[in-house]
Amino acid sequence: MFTQLRYDGSVVEGTPANKIILTVSATDVDSPSESISYSLDQLDEMYFTIGSKTGELRTGQILLDREKTPVLYFDVKASDEKKMTGVAGIKVGYHGRASIRLF
């Protein structure tokens, strides 16, 4: 069972690959000591990666254009050793770099 039903993260446009966006967490309610494995659908893996044991969601190799896709919604799955699964929603918002003004 995930500790949250939905996780929210944000990414600055142009962020390089492999930067942590957020970390998901789930436990097996029947056997809390059992290990949990996290995964994404194949399409979502184009833009993000997830640590199968850590739950760390990271930016992938393909960068999104925030003007075309300002927000992306997808699911993350958690599976225990008995192959029981749970699903949580992910929302990742993209925003531009803040302009810096020198006075």
Image (spheres, rainbow, N blue to C red):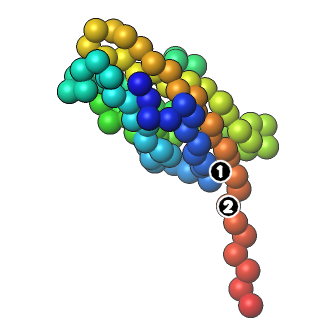
SS assignment at label 1: loop
- Label drawn at residue 13: 1
The residue under label 2 is which amino acid type?
Arg
- Label drawn at residue 97: 2
Q: Residue furthest front?
A: 30
Disc 1 residue crowd, few under 14, some 14–19, many 20+, Cα 10 Å: some
- Label drawn at residue 51: none
Give the residue at x 62% y 40%.
92
Disc 2 residue crowd, few under 14, some 14–19, many 20+, Cα 10 Å: few
Give the residue at x 32% y 36%.
54
Q: Along the line of sight, which residue is nearer the eye, 20 or 15?
A: 20
- Residue 44 found in image quarter: top right
Q: Is residue 2 left or right of residue 88?
A: left
Q: Is residue 32 left or right of residue 18?
A: left
Would residue 65 be seen by someone viewing this image from the given angle? no
User: Which badge, 2 or 1, is on the more N-terminal residue?
Assistant: 1
Q: Quadrant of the C terminus?
A: bottom right
Rendering coords of residue 42 (x, y %): 52, 17
- Residue 69 found in image quarter: top right
Rendering coords of residue 91 (x, y %): 63, 37
Q: Residue furthest left?
A: 33
Q: Quadrant of the N terminus?
A: top left
SS assignment at label 2: loop
Separation of marks 2 and 1 at Cα, in angstroms: 7 Å
| Depicted 40 relative to depicted 24: above or below | above
Q: Is residue 21 left or right of residue 51?
A: right
Q: How many numbered callouts?
A: 2
Q: Residue furthest right?
A: 67
| Depicted 45 relative to depicted 61: above or below | above
Would residue 10 be seen by someone viewing this image from the given angle? yes
Q: Along the line of sight, which residue is nearer the eye, 6 or 23?
A: 6
